[in-house]
Amino acid sequence: MIDKVTIDASVEWLVTDTESGYYVAFCEGLTMATQGETWSQLMQNIGDAMSLLFLSLLIEGEIDEFFSDRGWTKPPGLEVGTPIDMPFIAQQVDNHAYTSAALHQ
C-alpha cells in the first residue's frame, strides 16, 4: 500500500466567521460545508471532510465518475485506507459574499 496519495487538483473553500465565533466553510466544487471553532480546527475539518468524501466514493464505486466529471485524473494507488492529500484554498469572505456564493450552487 502507498503511504499517501496526492490528488492533482485544487478546490476553493469560501470561509466566513459567524456571530457565534465559529468559522464556516463552503466548497461549491465539492458541494460540501464544514465548520470549526478555530481557524486551525476548520483547516483540519476541511481535510477530514475531503478524506471522508473520497472514502465514501471509493466504497460506493463512484470515484472514477467523480474524477471524470471534474476533468481530474485519478491518481494511482487510490484505494480504501490510503491517506489522501488534496490541496485546497481557504478564502475568507464577508458574510454577504459567502451567502451569495452559497445560493448560487
Image (spheres, helix red, strand yellow):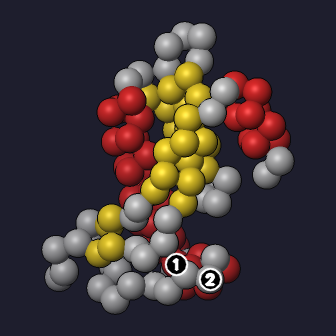
- Residue type pointed to by label 1: Ile
Q: Which quadrant of the view contains residue 99?
A: top right
In this view, 6 is above or below 11: below
In this view, 90 is above or below 61: above
Coordinates of residue 71 in the picture (x, y in percent): 62, 83
The answer to whether marks 2 and 1 mark residues whose Cβ atoms lie closer than 8 Å is: no
Camera-side residue of 49 and 99: 99
Q: Is residue 67 left or right of residue 54?
A: right
How crowded pointer 1 is (Cα within 10 Å; few <14, some 14-19, many 20+) is rated as some
Coordinates of residue 55 in the picture (x, y in percent): 41, 65
How crowded pointer 2 is (Cα within 10 Å; few <14, some 14-19, many 20+) is rated as few
Q: Which residue is mark 2?
A: 71
Q: Is residue 94 left or right of residue 62?
A: right
Question: Is residue 65 visible in this depiction of the protein?
Answer: no
Q: Residue furthest top?
A: 20
Camera-side residue of 56 and 75: 75
**Of tags 2 and 1, which is closer to the observer?**
2
Distance from disc 2 to disc 1, alpha carbons, whole Å, reads 12 Å
Coordinates of residue 80 in the picture (x, y in percent): 33, 73
Coordinates of residue 36 in the picture (x, y in percent): 43, 29
- Residue type pointed to by label 2: Gly
In this view, 6 is above or below 28: below
Q: Residue at x 45, y 66 (%)?
A: 54
Q: Residue at x 75, y 41 (%)?
A: 102
Q: Which residue is mark 1?
A: 63
Location of the N terminus by quadrant is bottom left
Q: Residue at x 34, y 89 (%)?
A: 76
Which disc, if any, is residue 50? Answer: none
Secondary structure beneath label 1: helix
Secondary structure beneath label 2: loop
